[in-house]
Amino acid sequence: MQDQINKSFNLLSEKLLSWFNAFVKNLPNLLIAIIVLVAFYYIAKYASKLVKRLISKRINQDSLVNIISKMTTIVVVAIGLFLALGVLNLSKTLETLIGAAGVSGLVIGLALQGTLSNTFAGIVLSFRKSIELGHWVETNGFSGEVVEISLKNFVVREADNNMVMIPNKNILENPVKNYSLTPKIRVSFNCGVGYESNLEFVEELTKKTIVNAFKGIEKEEDVEFYYQEFGGSSINFLCRFWIEGDKAIYKLRAINTAIIALKKAFDKNDINIPFPIRTLQFDNELTLDKNNVEKQPKEEKQ
């Protein structure tokens, strides 16, 4: 029994001694590996700040800038770790880590396929100059102001102040109408006048009224006027003109202003804007002949 204990103790001592010798032998490599890790730690901090400064000039989304800067830090630290493992002659461990990372990345990518597609779509949208924060857009059946472009959702504030969160991939896969890319908006509205109206005078009055109602319209030639049809109660026309603006709300305000001004002008000049009516016309006179009316028999009193 004593011999077995001594034998085990000797084996343990030899093992510890071999570990100590290996530690002393690899101590320079260990110091170099530590220096590499510390150096890459500070390099990662500097690289993160540099990337954040450069990207913030192109991207207005703070959350996205922070994510990209953190990803830069992770990449630089990972490079330092791999170099440190290489200095320690742990090539097999390095290969194992790379293989495990590849398999894990594949599994995670398959599991988070939708999330990753939204993430990459958010990055692409953040670099697009055609879609920026504050733009008024219409897409996927929604219309509003772009208030946020995150790594997951495209957030739009509608005219009724409701927030709509649309997945980023849907923005890339569907058409987007951006009202803020051009400095002007075309305004069009329809109206109708009575059949008894002087059509030439109506056209002239409409153009003059629009020019007087909007400062940006200098001459009557800038206002388009077209009669379209003989309607059931009126002769209908289309009026179009351009205004300064980059949001849909400006178009609504312009239509409101044009309708009010045109109604006042038509009322002042006795121009009728008919509403749907039905006229009943009787060409013959109805008469009642008392002699032809049959007399009803009177009830006999009992």
Image (tube, rainbow, N blue to C red):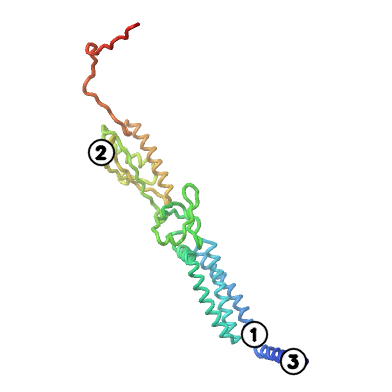
Q: CA distance from mark 2 to mark 1?
A: 93 Å
Q: What secondary structure is marked by label 3?
A: helix
Point out the frontmost of discs 2 and 3: 3
Residue closest to the far top: 302
Residue identifier under label 2: 230
Residues at badges 3 and 1 in contact (C-beta under 8 Å)? no
Point out the frontmost of discs 3 and 1: 3
Q: Nearer the viewer, residue 273 or 138?
A: 138
> Looking at the picture, does residue 73 appear above or below residue 136?
below
Q: Answer with left or right where residue 28 lies relative to residue 115.
A: right
- Label at residue 168: none
Q: Answer with left or right where residue 116 lies relative to residue 256.
A: right
Residue identifier under label 3: 4
Q: What secondary structure is marked by label 1?
A: helix
What residue appears at the point 44 percent right and 53 percent down from the top-left corner? 136
x, y percent for residue 8: 73, 90
Residues at badges 2 and 1 in contact (C-beta under 8 Å)? no
Residue closest to the far front: 302
What residue appears at the point 43 percent right and 47 percent down from the top-left corner? 249
**Badge 2: residue crowd in 10 Å (few <14, some 14–19, many ≥20):** few
- Label at residue 30: 1
Q: CA distance from mark 3 to mark 1?
A: 36 Å
Q: Nearer the viewer, residue 59 or 289?
A: 289
Q: Nearer the viewer, residue 151 or 235?
A: 151
Q: Earlier in the sequence, mark 3 or mark 1?
A: 3
x, y percent for residue 259: 38, 39
What residue appears at the point 48 percent right and 47 percent down from the top-left corner? 160
Indicate the amino acid at tag 1: Leu
Residue 301 lies in quadrant: top left
x, y percent for residue 295: 26, 11
